[in-house]
Image (cartoon, grey):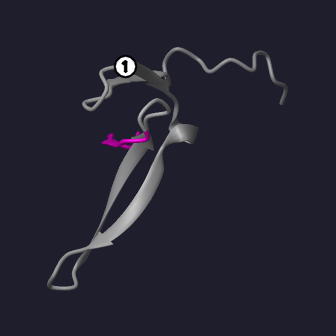
Amino acid sequence: MRVISRDPHPSVVKEKICTNCGVTLEYVPADIQTKIVSDYTGSKDSYSYITCPECKQDLSVIRY
């Protein structure tokens, strides 16, 4: 196996508009983080997000 290019392939690059500051972000699967949260009943759920580098807002994304 060998690396042909260090740039991410266009098929994995996604875009998201920050709902807080309005910038357009480009991200790849390696940028996605997962957070586990619990509600008042104690049940847990996880969600995937990226963090806007401009305003530090967490933006929900679909893991792919």
Asked if the magenta segment contains residue 48, the reply would be no
- Magenta stretch prevailing secondary structure: loop
Residue that numbered label 1 is attached to: 23
- The image quadrant where one finds the C terminus is top left
| Residue at the right extreme of this rendering | 2
Q: Amino acid at mark 1?
A: Val
- The percent coordinates of residue 5 (x first, y second) are 75, 16
Q: Which residues are magenta?
A: 56-64
Name the foreground residue: 43 vs 18: 18
Q: How many marks?
A: 1
Asked if the magenta segment contains residue 59, the reply would be yes
Instruction: Please state if 14 lies on the left or on the right of 9 as rendered.
Output: left
Instruction: Please state if 10 lies on the left or on the right of 8 as rendered.
Output: left
- The percent coordinates of residue 3 (x first, y second) are 81, 23
- The percent coordinates of residue 2 (x first, y second) are 85, 26
The residue depicted at 37 percent of the width and 19 percent of the height is 23
Instruction: Please state if 53 lies on the left or on the right of 47 as rendered.
Output: right
**How many neighbours does mark 1 have within 10 angstroms: few (below 14), some (14-19), or many (20 or more)?**
some
The residue depicted at 52 percent of the width and 30 percent of the height is 28
Q: Quadrant of residue 20?
A: top left
- The percent coordinates of residue 62 (x first, y second) are 32, 41
Q: Give the vertical position of 34 relative to 37 (above or below).
A: above
Disc 1 secondary structure class: loop
The residue depicted at 16 percent of the width and 81 percent of the height is 40
The residue depicted at 52 percent of the width and 14 percent of the height is 10
